[in-house]
Amino acid sequence: MVILMDYLQILGFGLIFVISAILLKKKSRAKLNEPPLVSYKFPIIGHTFDYYKDVQGFLAKCRDEYGEIFSLYMWGTVQTYVGKTTYSEVYKNHHTFDFNKAMEDIMPMHHFLNRPEGFLNDIDKYAREFMSDLDKFAERVQKNLNKSYNEFIGDGKVIRSPLKVIQQIISRPIAATIVGEELCNDNEILDSFANMTADLVPLLSFPPILNFIYPGLHQKFLIFKFKYFNNPIRTHRSIILSKIITVINKRINDKNRLRNSWKRPDDILQELTERFMIDENTVDIDSVADFIINFIFASVHTTSFIFTQCLYDYVNNPEYHEELLEEATSIYNKYKDTPYYTIDKIAEMDKLDNFIKETLRTNINATSMFRKTVSDFTFLSGYQVPKGRTIQTMTQHIHFDPKSYGPDPKKFNPYRHINSQSTRPERDYVAFGIGKTVCPGRFFAINEIKVAMHFMQLRYKIRSVSGNRVEPIVFAGFIFPNDEGLIFEKREDSVIQEF
Ligand code: HEM
């Protein structure tokens, strides 16, 4: 009996201790001077429905009432939103506002590939290193782009779902850069390049309703589903693996056989092979494949989206056609006796660069550059956010700021960017991010979109099937290219003699 009493006493003290600890923790949390939490009507649901009904309108209303930093209760958790001034504190304090941790919540890639946490963290370093000399890729990008145009548009065509076709067009030059010239004409590889991200996105964009039950449950569900059920990456991975094994083995044999006369291939596959060499004849091919998959995720979808948006902007703004064509024709005539444009020649396409930059500026999502805090943080305003908080940057607030872009900031006007390059991150232009995580593939992407637009204009006249303006689709704060068809009509007066 005495033993039972002792036991109950210890249990009682234990309970008091645990409850006090929880209360104390809550109290210390309560001490944080958090940004205002926008008021809401329904518990648990919070702002979720009001937000998705009209993302841009809702965020603008919150900014009017609460200022440019506030919190919303979304999908069962509190998220903090920062606007055009405060966001600089987020990207400058990248040790606290973690990019990889935030990505894990929506796309836990290392889990999908059965890899330990942090396995893919070097992707930015690799992208920076491998893409530092773009002249290596210039010729093959142009050659393969024109090959794609011949195959998919030829002497002119009506393209019903432009984004899908653009993804295929763009895949070949990107594949030539990533897996090399041996594989860039392989139909199975090209299919994986074009479709892998598109196969994955619908599975990832399922609304995180499970988080209403318990924050983080959605991520656990995704991991479970990808591990035991539908994982589209698995099929693409095995295709990529089966193709690169042959090429890597052949390259190793050639290198051993030819020694000093071996010509090292200039592509990302070779760079990764050298990074994951176990000894001079053995390579960790699985790791090479996993990084290739991540290069595909980072490059194909993004570049195809922007190129497609750019085509619609071109169709919607015919007042710029004449001067763009003039620039393209004069550059073509100047260099037509050289086999391809080097990077410094592509840099002469200034008007086109301004045009693409305006596409990037005006087609920005309502929010992006999200982060997760790894410790409590105090903003200069005195507001504080706790560890584990998701932070969203209101990117349209930055890109449509009248102080930077005048009284009509949403109007498409490439002249805004004279003398300001599309690849340069600026306080009021973050299409490629800014700070530590700024996109390392932006120079490659812009060069590719520039040559794609250059040859497109020289080869074809382009208009929409309806003959009208074609606006992008806005859904849940995200901007998607429209699906309306485009007509590509061969220019009979083209300066390019032979396609
Ligand atoms: C038009 C095309 C592209 C756009 C609009 C774009 C946009 C972006 C943005 C906004 C970020 C920063 C995200 C953030 O800070 O939250 C980013 C990061 C990144 N991008 Fe791109 N990107 C494009 C093409 C590419 C290409 C071709 C590659 C080539 C591999 C690439 C590789 C990456 C990587 C690896 C990161 C992560 C950087 C890090 O972890 O520090 N991107 N991109």
Image (spheres, rainbow, N blue to C red):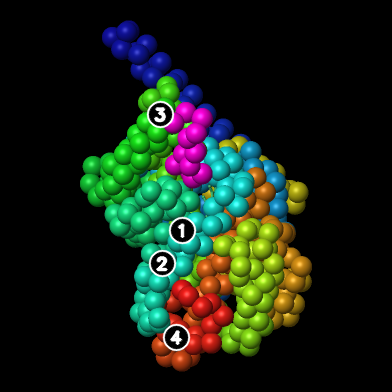
Residue 496 point in image, percent of width and height: 53, 77
| Kind of residue sitting beneath label 3 | Arg
Query: Which residue lies most toward the bottom here?
Result: 467
Earlier in the chain: of badge 1 and badge 3, it is 1
Residue 294 point in image, percent of width and height: 44, 46
* Mark 2 Cα shell of 10 Å, populated few (<14), some (14-19), many (≥20): many
Residues at badges 3 and 4 in contact (C-beta under 8 Å)?
A: no
Q: Which mark is residue 19?
A: none
**In whole angstroms, how far apart are the C-alphas of marks 2 and 3?**
35 Å
Q: Is 257 placed left or right of 92 in the picture? A: left
- Determine which residue is flagged by label 4: 489
- Determine which residue is flagged by label 3: 257
Q: Is 102 placed left or right of 426 in the picture? A: left
Q: Is residue 269 visible?
A: yes
Instruction: Give the residues drawn in magenta, as a range.
Output: 258-270
| Kind of residue sitting beneath label 4 | Glu
SS at mark 2 in the image: helix
Residues at badges 1 and 2 in contact (C-beta under 8 Å)?
A: yes
SS at mark 3 in the image: helix
| Kind of residue sitting beneath label 1 | Pro
Query: Which residue lies most toward the top here?
Result: 2
Question: Does the beta carbon at disc 4 come under 8 Å from ligand 1?
Answer: no
**In whole angstroms, how far apart are the C-alphas of marks 1 and 2?**
8 Å
Residue 91 point in image, percent of width and height: 66, 49
Q: Is 51 placed left or right of 217 in the picture? A: right
- Determine which residue is flagged by label 2: 148
